[in-house]
């Protein structure tokens, strides 16, 4: 009897160990969590900003790896997030205008797949967390329609029970409007204003509001890291912090200058997960990296392979090929009908503006005119003849071509097009960009349908009407400084 009982126990133990080993094997694959801030440039302590209070992101960088030249494919949320959803440029997908009406959203063409779908086929549960403490927006904002299933859940608790998982948590910070709710107020006297903006109390107050949003975003990161530990996930979850595009300022967001496309990115591997050969704790990476590359690298983190159709490439592996050239694009943004493309190397950037809707300041959406005080500051100071040449350029017609030496001119102020010393270089960049437009299948040069033109014209009229009072109030508030 005892022998039979022992045999049953042995069989049960073997079964338990078998089940346990399967569970362990499944959970041995790392979870991957993207933390996505909105409208944030590299204005963090780990990137050298001494005014902000960002200990959580700085700690993540110190114990992980900081990436210094990461660029989104577009300088606004929807185009950028469209590429982050697929690992393919939004221009290749034919999904590049912000904002289409729902019925005009293009269909995601074959053979492209969204990242949650690719992860699901690799055995991963997926989630876009809609509420996490004081944050979590559940934002996708993709510029396409698809019948593919996106996320499995928007609940954090479901992730805990379904591992391995790929998930993202989106912040509304540091998108406008600025709430000024940081525990660590920014001293406006210590702010360094880029030279293309007037150094004025209006600029400083606006900049302070943005930097305080950065502080609040860091608090959210701290909450997430604490929750990972509380739920026993910290040792098996790769955490990636990034922004969808650059800061929400005139000449930054919506533009192909570095202020609009250069973003922070920090990757942290936990102690229980093997790191790839290109990952070095506490170090930084200065290679130029595109947003589509993050999609490709994320697949590799989970043991999946990169599909042949994906335009992203790995950047942490022994066989990774660093980019010599990096490409960005912008098309219609709300009521502004624009089309620009840019190519850059480590040192130089070439921008080709195919549609020129006006000056930088003039090419500001109605929504932004109601929410950006610097827009009005530039106009008022321009009317009064108070702007120096560098700032006055924002009120002048945009050049059709721009070339910048980023090493000697990091603010992209001195346009080298027309300088005989750089004529050959300009030609090389122009040819390179033309080749990429063709090879990538850039559909942004297709003629817009009558329905799209009509939609965006109507959108411009309706937003102008809706924002009319807000624009007047914002202008009046700035004019008060000159009375």
Image (tube, grey):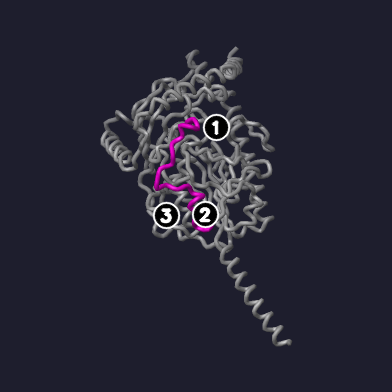
Place of residue 409 in the rendered image (x, y in percent of width and height, measured from the top left): 41, 35
Q: Earlier in the sequence, mark 1 or mark 2?
A: 2
The residue lying toward the viewer, choosing from 125 and 280, is 125
Q: What residue lies at 50% left-to-right and 57% top-to-bottom? A: 122
Q: Residues within 10 Å of mark 1 (few under 14, many from 20)?
A: few
Q: Position of residue 473 (x, y in %)?
A: 60, 17
Q: Mark on residue 354? A: none
In the rendered image, which residue does mark 3 sit on?
Answer: 306
Sequence-wise, the earlier of marks 3 and 2 is 2
Magenta-highlighted residues: 98-123
Question: In x, y percent, where is residue 308?
Answer: 37, 52
The residue tagged with tag 3: helix, strand or loop? Answer: loop
Secondary structure under the numbered disc 1 in the rendered image: loop
Circle 2 SS class: helix
Name the residue rendered at 60%, 48% in the picture: 153
- Quarter holding the N terminus is bottom right
Nearer to us in this view, 342 or 141: 141
Q: Against 19, is 367 above or below?
A: above
How far apart are labels 1 and 2 at the CA level? Answer: 46 Å
- Which residue is denoted by mark 2 in the rendering? 120
One can see residue 219 in this view: no
**Residue receiving disc 1:** 192
- Mark 2, other Cα within 10 Å: few <14 / some 14–19 / many ≥20: some
Q: What separation in Å lies between label 3 and label 2 (alpha carbons)?
A: 14 Å
View extreme (right): residue: 1
């Amino acid at each position: 009897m005892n022998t039979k009982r022992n045999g049953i126990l042995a069989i049960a133990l073997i079964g338990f160990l078998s089940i346990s080993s399967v569970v362990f094997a499944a959970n041995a694959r790392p979870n991957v969590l993207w933390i996505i801030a909105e409208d944030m440039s590299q204005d963090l302590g780990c990137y050298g900003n001494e005014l902000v209070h960002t200990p959580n992101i700085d700690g993540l960088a110190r114990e992980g790896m900081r990436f210094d030249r990461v660029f989104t494919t577009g300088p606004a949320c929807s185009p950028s997030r469209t590429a982050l959803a697929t690992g393919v440029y939004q221009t290749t997908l034919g999904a590049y205008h912000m904002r289409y009406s729902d019925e005009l959203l293009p269909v995601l063409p074959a053979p492209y797949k969204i990242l949650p779908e690719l992860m699901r086929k690799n055995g991963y549960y997926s989630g876009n967390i809609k509420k996490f403490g004081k944050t979590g927006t559940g934002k996708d904002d993709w510029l396409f329609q698809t019948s593919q299933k996106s996320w499995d859940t928007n609940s954090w608790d479901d992730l805990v029970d379904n591992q391995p998982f790929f998930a993202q948590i989106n912040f509304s910070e540091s998108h406008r409007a600025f709430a000024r709710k940081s525990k660590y107020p920014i001293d406006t006297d210590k702010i360094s204003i880029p030279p293309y903006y007037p150094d004025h109390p209006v600029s400083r107050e606006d900049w302070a509001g943005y930097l305080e949003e950065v502080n609040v975003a860091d608090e959210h990161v701290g909450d997430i890291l604490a929750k990972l530990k509380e739920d026993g996930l910290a040792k098996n979850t790769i955490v990636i912090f990034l922004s969808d595009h650059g800061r929400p300022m005139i000449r930054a967001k919506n533009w192909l200058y570095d202020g609009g496309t250069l973003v922070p990115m920090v990757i942290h591997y936990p102690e229980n997960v093997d790191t790839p050969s290109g990952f070095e704790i506490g170090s930084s990476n200065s290679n130029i990296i595109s947003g589509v590359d993050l999609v490709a690298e994320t697949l590799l983190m989970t043991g999946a392979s990169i599909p042949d159709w994906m335009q992203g490439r790995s950047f942490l592996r022994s066989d990774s090929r660093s980019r010599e050239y990096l490409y960005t694009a912008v098309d219609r943004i709300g009521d502004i009908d624009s089309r620009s493309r840019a190519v850059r190397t480590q040192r130089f950037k070439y921008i080709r503006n195919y549609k020129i809707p006006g000056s930088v300041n003039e090419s500001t959406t109605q929504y932004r005119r109601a929410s950006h005080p610097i827009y009005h500051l530039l106009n008022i100071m321009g009317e009064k003849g108070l702007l120096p040449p560098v700032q006055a350029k924002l009120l002048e017609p945009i050049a059709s071509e721009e070339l910048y030496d980023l090493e000697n001119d990091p603010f992209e102020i001195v346009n080298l097009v027309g300088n005989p010393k750089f004529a050959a270089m300009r030609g090389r960049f122009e040819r390179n960009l033309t080749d990429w437009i063709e090879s990538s299948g850039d559909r942004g040069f297709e003629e817009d349908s009558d329905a799209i033109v009509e939609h965006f014209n109507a959108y411009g009229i309706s937003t102008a009407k809706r924002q009319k009072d807000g624009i007047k109030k914002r202008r009046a508030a700035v004019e008060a400084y000159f009375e």
